[in-house]
């Protein structure tokens, strides 16, 4: 077994090398369904792993090329799915714990490459020293070229099914090494299976995230937590809370954290033991180093972000909101209303904000301002601003949210997106709303009342008379269903009506509300919506005697969204494209 890696069952060690054998001779291969066979043919080491599992005791895990969210309802999940081209994940039940196991199945874990790594590492140090790559891709290509020179695939003793690794390359550094003989390199002879394992391991350690590579590559992971020595815990989009089979000792954890901080370019020390940074894939990481400030040793937390946001149709499938609510948001954003998505940590605020932005007119100019890059707009005319801390010894000044928001007002945006309002930038955001710039943002508050309290108190200090410039407050939360599962729901959509000088308070209307008993949403403001009747209808020139037209438009858009949903479209970009086509064809144009 790999150091620090412990399987939750006693593994069988198999003598079969599936890389060079006829797969049809393997009993396990023959009983796999077609999708399982395809995965085994693509990566034969997966069969090697299946041979290690005591199938008589725990059963054969089912292989899923793609996960369905309904699998999260399984009481004892025992399944395998791919997390990228070279990694598989085994979800294995633990009958004694509320968290099941998350087992990364990697090539070097299956194939014994320990004897070869010292010489490979030694040769790599000598060879890569002469290069100075300027990008991550160049570094990867250099490592691959070096490995191709160091390693020789032995296809004499095995069937000649392996493809040569010394192929032609368009990379500018290729060929600088010369032949192995001319370079005088000490080579390592490997089977194709061993070579693939060595290559994966080297890339994982040198340019990847080491032990964290599988969970970083897995698009189903939302949160990665190491709270000290022991296992790493995960929050999975389908299976929720899981524990990995990777465990740290205190010494190994400190070493890993130091290496991790150096990889992300923010070295950590005992004098400066806390680091907040962004990983190359956009994920946010927080590291605390040393047991003097963390009693169970160093710890780190990574909050992952998807490469592509979830569409509103996907959120509707999951029950976060319904078609009528989505149609309501469509009208509001199209007509330039300002909205805050508010809720507690990890309630899905940014996910909903990203999904909503598909309703912003496609020809709009958007400026987004964030501490960490989380907002993802589908629009082409999108300016993305990120804050910057002061650079030590580099004469670099601090650039905060307040500075970027002031700059954004000079860029003539149609919409301003603020990743999260926490401080004095809140006052500027409300000034932007007053000058006619719609603002969308996220906010940490569990109710409208709490949101108003935070806005009008320190350190934001927005005058109460300004708050009614905000049109919508969407309350989002993670709630527990009767079956114990945690799900994300829009608890309410609230319309800010105005400031009452007599009571010195703000009045608001709950337009939509979630019923926890039926797990459904209701349109409580149907026929009495302040924003639809007093703002949107007037803006569109609808007379007060015909306000029913705005509700007819709402129902029409809900039907359009439902029809798009029934067509099977779920991709974020495809959904935005479809909304653009709908508007271009004039299907949302109201005749007064």
Image: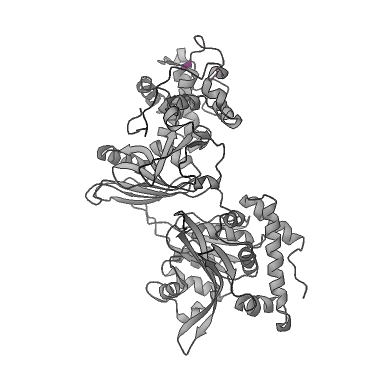
**Depicted 573 relative to depicted 164: above or below:** below
Q: Is residue 549 left or right of residue 154?
A: right
Q: Nearer the viewer, residue 546 or 318?
A: 318
- Chain part drawn in magenta: 152-172
**Camera-side residue: 133 or 46?**
46
In the rendered view, tell whether residue 530 sits above or below residue 260: below
Q: Where residue 255 sits: x, y (%)?
A: 29, 38
Furthest-front residue in view?
56
Relative horizontal placement of residue 212, taking residue 141 as reference (left or right): left
In the image, residue 387 sits, relative to residue 539, either above or below, namely above
Considering every residue shown, the one lying at the far bottom of the view is: 502
- Judge left or right: residue 258 versus residue 195: left
Which quarter shows the N terminus?
Answer: top left
| Residue 434 x/y as whole percent | 55, 76
Work out which quarter of the rendered image holds the C terminus and state it. bottom right
Residue nearest the viewer, comparing 189 with 501:
501
Q: Residue at x 27, y 38 (%)?
A: 249
Task: Judge left or right: residue 20 versus residue 397.
Answer: right
Residue at image coords 44%, 19%? 150
**Residue 131 seen anywhere in this rendered image of the structure:** no
* Residue name at image x 49 percent, y 50 percent: 305
Of 437 and 67, the residue lying toward us: 67
Magenta residues, dominant SS class: loop
Task: State how the image is colored.
Answer: one colour
Where residue 260 appears, as percent x and y from the top left, is 36, 41
Q: Residue at x 42, y 76 (%)?
A: 456
Q: Position of residue 455 (x, y in %)?
A: 43, 73
Marker count (numbered) = 0
Is 158 magenta? The answer is: yes
Is residue 176 rendered magenta in the image?
no
The reply to whether residue 331 is visible in this rendering is yes
């Amino acid at each position: 077994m790999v150091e620090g890696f412990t399987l939750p069952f006693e593994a069988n060690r198999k003598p079969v090398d599936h890389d060079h054998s006829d797969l049809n001779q393997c009993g396990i291969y023959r009983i796999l369904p077609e999708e399982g066979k395809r995965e085994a043919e693509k990566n034969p080491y997966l069969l090697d792993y299946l041979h290690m599992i005591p199938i008589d005791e725990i059963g054969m895990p089912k292989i899923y090329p793609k996960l369905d969210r309904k699998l999260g309802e399984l009481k004892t999940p025992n399944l395998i799915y791919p997390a990228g081209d070279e990694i598989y994940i085994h979800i294995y039940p633990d009958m004694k714990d509320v968290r099941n196991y998350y087992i990364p199945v990697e090539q070097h874990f299956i194939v014994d490459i320990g004897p070869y790594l010292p010489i490979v590492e030694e040769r790599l140090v000598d060879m890569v020293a002469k290069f100075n790559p300027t990008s991550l891709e160049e570094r990867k290509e250099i490592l691959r070229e070096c490995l191709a020179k160091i390693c020789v695939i032995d296809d004499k003793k095995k069937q000649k099914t392996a493809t040569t690794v010394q192929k032609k390359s368009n990379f500018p550094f290729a060929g600088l090494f010369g032949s192995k003989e001319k370079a005088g390199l000490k080579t390592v002879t490997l089977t194709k299976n061993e070579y693939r394992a060595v290559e994966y391991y080297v890339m994982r350690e040198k340019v990847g995230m080491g032990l964290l590579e599988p969970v970083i590559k897995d698009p189903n992971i939302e949160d990665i937590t190491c709270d000290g020595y022991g296992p790493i815990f995960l929050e999975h989009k389908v299976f929720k809370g899981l524990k990995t089979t990777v465990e740290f000792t205190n010494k190994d954890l400190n070493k890993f954290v130091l290496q991790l901080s150096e990889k992300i370019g923010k070295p950590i020390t005992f004098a400066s033991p806390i680091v907040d940074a962004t990983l190359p894939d956009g994920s946010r990481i927080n590291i605390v180093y040393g047991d003097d400030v963390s009693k169970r040793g160093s710890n780190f937390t990574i909050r992952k972000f998807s490469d592509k946001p979830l569409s509103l149709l996907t959120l509707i499938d999951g029950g976060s909101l319904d078609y009528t609510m989505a149609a309501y948001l469509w009208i509001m954003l199209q007509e330039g209303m300002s909205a805050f998505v508010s809720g507690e940590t990890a309630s899905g605020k940014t996910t909903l904000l990203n999904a909503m932005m598909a309703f912003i007119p496609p020809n709009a100019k958007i400026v987004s301002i964030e501490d960490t890059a989380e907002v993802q707009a589908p629009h082409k005319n999108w300016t993305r601003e990120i804050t910057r801390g002061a650079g030590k010894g580099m004469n670099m000044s601090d650039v905060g949210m307040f500075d970027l928001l002031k700059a954004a007002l000079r860029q003539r945006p149609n919409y301003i997106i603020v990743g999260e309002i926490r401080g004095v930038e809140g006052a500027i955001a409300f000034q932007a709303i007053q000058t006619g710039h719609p603002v969308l943002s996220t906010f940490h508050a569990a109710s409208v009342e709490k949101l108003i309290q935070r806005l009008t108190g320190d350190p934001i200090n927005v005058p109460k008379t300004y708050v009614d410039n905000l049109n919508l407050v969407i309350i989002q939360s993670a709630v527990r269903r009767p079956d114990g599962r945690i799900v994300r729901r829009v608890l309410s959509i609230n319309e800010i009506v105005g400031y009452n000088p007599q009571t010195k308070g703000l009045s608001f209307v709950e337009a939509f509300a979630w019923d926890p008993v039926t797990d459904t949403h209701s349109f409580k403001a149907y026929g009495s919506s302040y924003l639809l009747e007093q703002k949107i209808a007037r803006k569109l020139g609808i007379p007060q005697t015909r306000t029913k037209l705005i509700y007819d438009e709402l129902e029409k858009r809900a039907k359009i969204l439902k029809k798009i949903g029934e067509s099977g479209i779920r991709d974020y970009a495809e959904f935005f494209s479809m909304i653009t086509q709908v508007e271009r064809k004039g299907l949302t144009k109201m005749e007064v």
